[in-house]
């Protein structure tokens, strides 16, 4: 479906609602294709092409949201289900009304047709580079262990149209490609990933080389004592820090409920920390408007360590007497506004130089299974994986077995705790935030992977 057809479908749904209610509609179309590999062989190719519509009606102050994937025959049923559901809901006294007409901001069209419709052999070429990097790369040793690779390469595109009965009309689209995987030797794994807006930008060989090198260096991993460690966190870890720090702390709903650490105007973080949310930046893979039809704009959340702003949707903005910042999400009544397009400003230092400045500490590749323990202080627990290394006198001297950490992300980035910021910012993490490597004064590891 192209943009005109998506908008026409949204208009058709609004016509079915008529003047019986306020209404907003989001219609989307997306294609996602995935090539999986394990034991260094491709074992699965899957692709999904889907179309969806989400409708919210507000009739007599009663609101309900429903959805459908049957765009060709299911639109009348979608509308009637919405009215039936709304009739069962209580009146919502906090309903903020619909987003008024407003143009989307200037936005680089991150759309690449070859990525949106990439065939299996295109992804297979990326996978081939990843796998063979472990077999013929410079990290391999004659007579040494052979690595085996596992992971996936994914491509796809997503188009979205928004329309409401207040006259707002918007359209956006983006493409995305990624390769993620591990190389494995007996007793050790090494991982790496790359995300881009175009499949042609993926370098499977370079990504595989990083993963294989980490696996081979991890063969004789040792245990270290838990406690406070100086750390160098690679971008995948930093993206996890951003997800919890910003999603919890700068959410206006959490802030109003006293569940946020943020004190606006105060220097709560290190001066090296500047965090911006900006869906209009061409380096980010996003749509320049939110689920409520509010255009996104650049929002500086932290400027040189000072907490400068909160993210608002229409509901929290009405309660606070301000305007939405374009961070509404589906289900925002419960979740509140969520920044999705985060940038942590990079620094001047290469990752190698960050490591060289560590007297004794740990280099961490990735976090996983992270869970928040205390929303107010953003204390998170999780595990390391896919490559953790001991650094002594500025050199990586060996591998370390996986560790559990329990750490306040706010404290980790607090004043005086950020010792260096890398110049290697890139898209990383499950939410694809744009972040660099960080060198932090301390990180609390609470035990081994088993406790």
Image (cartoon, rainbow, N blue to C red):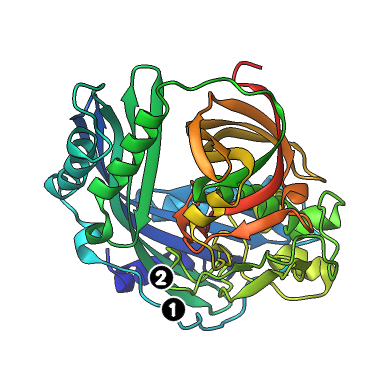
* Residue 283 falls in image quadrant: bottom left
Q: Nearer the viewer, residue 349 or 129?
A: 349
- The residue positioned 73% from the left and 76% from the top of the image is 323
Up-down relation of residue 21 to residue 207 (above or below): below
Residues at discs 1 and 2 in contact (Cβ within 8 Å): yes
- Location of residue 406 in the rendering, given as x and y in whole percent from the top left corner: 72, 33
Q: Quadrant of the C terminus?
A: top right
* Residue 34 falls in image quadrant: top left
Secondary element at image label 2 = strand
Report how far apart the C-alphas of labels 1 and 2 lie in the structure: 9 Å
Q: Quadrant of the N terminus?
A: bottom left
- The residue positioned 78% from the left and 70% from the top of the image is 318
Secondary element at image label 1 = loop
Mark number displayed over residue 221: none
Identify the residue under disc 2: 172
Q: Nearer the viewer, residue 79 or 211?
A: 211
- Location of residue 370 in the rendering, given as x and y in whole percent from the top left corner: 61, 35
Mark 2: give few (<14), some (14-19) or many (20+) Cα within 10 Å.
Answer: many
Identify the residue under disc 1: 107
- Location of residue 202 in the rendering, given as x and y in whole percent from the top left corner: 27, 55
Relative horizontal placement of residue 95, taking residue 46 as reference (left or right) = right
């Amino acid at each position: 479906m192209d943009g005109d057809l998506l908008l026409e479908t949204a208009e058709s749904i609004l016509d079915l609602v008529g003047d019986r209610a306020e209404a907003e509609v989001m219609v989307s179309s997306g294609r996602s294709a995935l090539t999986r590999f394990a034991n260094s062989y491709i074992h699965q190719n899957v692709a999904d092409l889907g179309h969806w519509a989400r409708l919210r009606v507000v009739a007599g102050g009663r609101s309900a949201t429903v959805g459908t994937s049957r765009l060709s025959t299911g639109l009348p049923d979608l509308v009637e289900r919405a009215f039936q559901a709304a009739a069962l809901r209580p009146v919502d006294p906090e309903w903020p009304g619909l987003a008024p007409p407003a143009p989307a901001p200037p936005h680089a069209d991150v759309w690449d047709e070859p990525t949106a419709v990439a065939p299996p052999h295109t992804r297979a070429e990326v996978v081939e580079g990843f796998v063979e990097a472990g077999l013929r790369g410079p990290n391999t040793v004659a007579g040494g262990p052979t690595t085996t690779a596992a992971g996936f390469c994914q491509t796809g595109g997503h188009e979205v149209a928004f329309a409401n009965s207040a006259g707002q009309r918007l359209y956006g689209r983006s493409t995305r490609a990624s390769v993620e995987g591990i190389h494995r030797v007996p007793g050790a794994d090494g991982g790496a990933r790359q995300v881009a807006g175009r499949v042609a930008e993926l370098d499977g060989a370079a990504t595989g080389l990083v993963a294989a090198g980490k696996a081979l260096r991890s063969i004789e991993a040792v245990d270290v004592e838990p406690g406070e460690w100086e750390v160098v966190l690679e971008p995948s870890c930093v993206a996890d820090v951003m997800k919890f720090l910003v999603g919890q702390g700068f959410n206006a709903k959490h802030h109003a409920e006293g569940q946020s650490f943020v004190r606006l105007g105060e220097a709560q973080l290190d001066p090296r920390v500047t965090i911006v949310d900006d869906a209009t930046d061409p380096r980010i893979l996003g749509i320049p408007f939110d689920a409520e039809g509010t255009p996104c704009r650049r929002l500086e959340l932290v400027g040189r360590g000072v907490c400068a702003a909160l993210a608002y949707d229409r509901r929290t903005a009405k309660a606070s007497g301000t305007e939405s910042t374009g961070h509404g999400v589906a289900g925002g009544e419960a979740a509140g506004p969520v920044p999705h397009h985060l940038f942590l400003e990079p620094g001047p230092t290469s990752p190698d130089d960050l490591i060289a400045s560590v007297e004794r500490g740990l280099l961490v590749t990735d976090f996983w299974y992270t869970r928040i323990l205390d929303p107010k202080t953003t204390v998170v627990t999780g595990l390391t994986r896919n490559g953790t290394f001991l650094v002594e006198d500025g050199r990586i001297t060996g591998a370390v077995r996986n560790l559990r950490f329990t750490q306040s992300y706010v404290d980790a980035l607090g004043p005086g705790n950020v010792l260096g910021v890398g110049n290697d910012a890139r898209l990383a993490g499950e939410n694809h935030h744009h972040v660099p490597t960080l060198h932090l004064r301390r990180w609390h590891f609470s035990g081994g992977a088993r406790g």
